[in-house]
């Protein structure tokens, strides 16, 4: 078994969940999301975030608006849609179940 | 002394060293290939370019006004190569649209004398274009048939414009490695031309 591959598989699902969680608090600029994900060490290379954001946007979970910036060109601010919120609620539930299940097995 | 190139990245303008520019161009081209199958791939690329511009700007100060190759390497390691990105996504790197042996005849604009018909045929059959040229010239003297055939072929055969087409012309599989090689070759020719 390839340890790195297993870790990558674990992170993959979690990353999508984390992006939605970050955005559930307030709308964010992509670089703010990156900063938070990096601090929490759930993302390794930044390039991973952008395809995920676009996929989630295409799936109707996110939307974005352009906002003027004082330092340069307008920035894209992402926010959750209503669909995104219910999607996140589902993920919250399954995350809790998952943690419980894993803990039950680990502490047996 | 070094030559610098001026680029527009994510709406900002940068002066960048020539070697750093080559590296950056190759990286962006690889990303483009990596996301080629994706819906809204151009949007993903634009987002990445915007982020790249931000990272570059953080590297510039009043004293340092040019992006060098070290900056490009650091930025690439922060953003990740296509391989890193797919590792992180947990999907194995696929060879994008590699159509093995997909072989088409194109006119070769890089080695042309008139319209690139003979050089294209040479590349297609992997023979010296000189042989094709001699046959055409011989036909041209024998009643002008060569000229007519050449004109028809010129109209019928498309020109190899993109890197992928140039690789297809030679019948090599179009994948990331071949494209990387050809881009490198293209860049070196341009650089040689600039020196003279």
Image: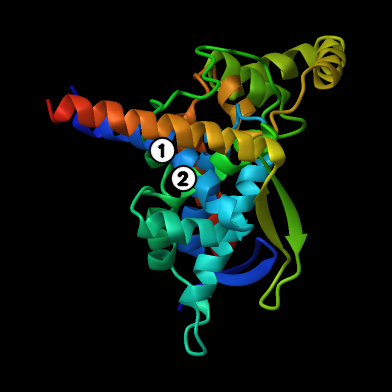
Image quarter where the C terminus of chain B lies is: bottom right
Q: Secondary structure at mark 2?
A: helix
Q: What residue appears at the point 77 percent right and 30 percent down from the top-left corner? A: B115
User: Do callouts 2 and 1 point to residues on the same chain?
Assistant: yes
Q: Quadrant of residue B177?
A: top left
Compared to residue B8, the image places residue A17 above or below, namely above
**Which of the labelled discs sits on residue A14, or is there none?**
1
Residue B183 seen = yes
Q: Are marks 2 and 1 in contact (CB under 8 Å)?
A: yes
SS at mark 1? Answer: helix
Left or right of residue B116: residue B44: left
Residue B117 figure quarter: top right
Instruction: Give the labeled residue for mark 2.
Output: A18
Give the alpha-carbon distance from disc 2 to disc 1, as whole Å: 6 Å
- Tell me where residue B145 appears, x and y as whole percent: 85, 10
Q: Nearer the viewer, residue B167 or A70?
A: A70
Residue drawn at the location 41% of the way across and 38% of the way down: A14
Q: Is residue B69 above or below residue B27?
A: below
């Amino acid at each position: 078994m390839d340890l790195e591959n297993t870790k990558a598989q674990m992170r993959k699902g979690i990353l999508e969940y984390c992006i939605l969680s970050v955005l559930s608090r307030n709308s964010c600029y992509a670089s703010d999301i990156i900063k938070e994900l990096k601090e929490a060490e759930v993302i390794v290379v930044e390039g991973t975030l952008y395809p995920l954001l676009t996929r989630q946007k295409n799936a109707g979970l996110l939307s974005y608006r352009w906002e003027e910036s004082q330092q340069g060109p307008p920035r894209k601010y992402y926010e959750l849609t209503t669909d995104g919120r219910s999607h996140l609620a589902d993920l919250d539930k399954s995350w809790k179940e998952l943690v419980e299940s894993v803990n039950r097995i680990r502490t047996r | 002394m070094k030559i610098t190139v001026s680029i527009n990245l994510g709406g900002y303008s940068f002066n960048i060293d020539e070697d750093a520019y080559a590296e950056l161009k190759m990286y962006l081209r690889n990303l483009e290939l990596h996301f080629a199958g994706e819906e809204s791939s151009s949007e993903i690329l634009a987002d990445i370019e915007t982020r790249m511009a931000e990272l570059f700007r953080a590297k510039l100060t009043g004293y340092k006004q040019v992006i060098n190759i070290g900056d490009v390497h650091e930025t690439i390691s922060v953003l990740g190569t296509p391989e890193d990105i797919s590792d992180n996504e947990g999907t194995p790197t696929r060879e994008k649209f590699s159509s093995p042996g997909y072989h088409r005849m194109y006119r070769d604009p890089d080695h042309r004398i008139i319209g690139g018909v003979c050089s294209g045929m040479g590349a297609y059959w992997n023979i010296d274009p000189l042989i094709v040229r001699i046959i055409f010239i011989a036909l041209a003297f024998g009643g002008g048939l060569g000229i007519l055939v050449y004109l028809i072929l010129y109209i019928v055969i498309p020109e190899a414009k993109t890197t992928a087409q140039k690789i297809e012309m030679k019948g090599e599989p179009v994948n990331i490695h071949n494209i990387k090689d050809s881009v490198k070759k293209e860049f070196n020719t341009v650089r040689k031309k600039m020196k003279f």
